[in-house]
Amino acid sequence: MSAGTGNSDTLPLVRIVDVSKSFGPLKILRNVSLDVHRGQALVIIGPSGSGKTTLVRCINHLEPIDGGRIFVDGELVGYREAGGRLVPLDERAAARQRASIGMVFQRFNLFPHLTALDNVMVGPLRVLRRRRADVQDEAVALLERVRLGDKLHAYPGQLSGGQQQRVAIARALAMKPRVLLFDEPTSALDPEMVGEVLDTMRGLAESGMTMIVVTHEMGFAREVADRVVMMDAGAIVEEGSPQAIFGSPAHARTRLFLQAIR
Ligand code: ADP
């Protein structure tokens, strides 16, 4: 994304405005609006099928939207305005834009034939076309940051799920994203590996990274989220501080959901 769009820190970094999205006849997102400020960690909760994954996939334009607008740092995501209409960005422009909106997936999505180090370097080298010498030092530092300094040359198949997910986080960070999206990053992990990934995410939030996290880890949401958003049936039913959402939810749907997962 182009830098210097003239936004002050008081403007939301991510603005989701009246977004709707259908798959065929199924309305998946119904006029969703949401702001996320710089440095905030926002956690999205809600029942399975409520549209959480679809919403985060729309934020980096892995899914096209049918209506509304999404802005990151003031820049329209996935489209350009032409005569009052939205025209999709071409693949190159969309890929360049997507590179600045990091995403960590449920199933890691590492390249199996590349080492941890090469997985972290591939984006900066191929997409950003940066110099190998600069990229390598940064990639090593990132893998050390996620406590994998001793696994630089391991292949994904030689790493545990928790380690692979930490490589995936380092890979996302290597692109110096403006915001990092997490789509249920611990739900494919064995229970004993969930903590190490959540600890890494907690560290990122403390370092001031802007994060949007879809998760069923309510302990993490309570401790780390600045704001919690509850989705149901494609809409935001309630949002607030973790204290408010978990302590005194205003909406019956939120109360039912929280009771069901306890
Ligand atoms: P959540 O993350 O809250 O579980 P999702 O965003 O994954 O919800 O899914 C919302 C709904 O959209 C579900 O009913 C799901 O089956 C449907 N859906 C998701 N992706 C697709 C797709 N590519 N094609 C058709 N339906 C989809």
Image (tube, rainbow, N blue to C red):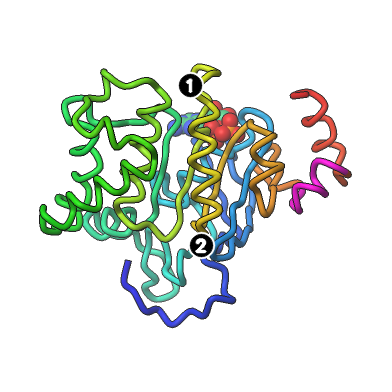
Q: Badges 2 and 1: C-beta atoms under 8 Å apart? A: no
Helix, strand or loop for disc 2: strand
Q: Which residue is mark 2?
A: 69
Image quarter of residue 122: top left
Is residue 22 highlighted in magenta? no
Q: Does any atom of ligand 1 lie closer than 8 Å to the CB of label 2?
A: no
Q: Which residues are magenta?
A: 238-247
Q: Does any atom of ligand 1 lie closer than 8 Å to the CB of label 1?
A: no
Q: Which residue is mark 1?
A: 189
What number is the disc on residue 17?
none
Front position among marks 2 and 1: 1
Image quarter of residue 9: bottom right
Magenta span dominant secondary structure: helix
Within 10 Å of disc 2 (Cα), the crowding (few <14, some 14-19, many 20+) is many
Q: Amino acid at mark 2?
A: Arg
Labels 2 and 1: the sequence-earlier one? 2
Q: Residue at x 55, y 63 (%)?
A: 15
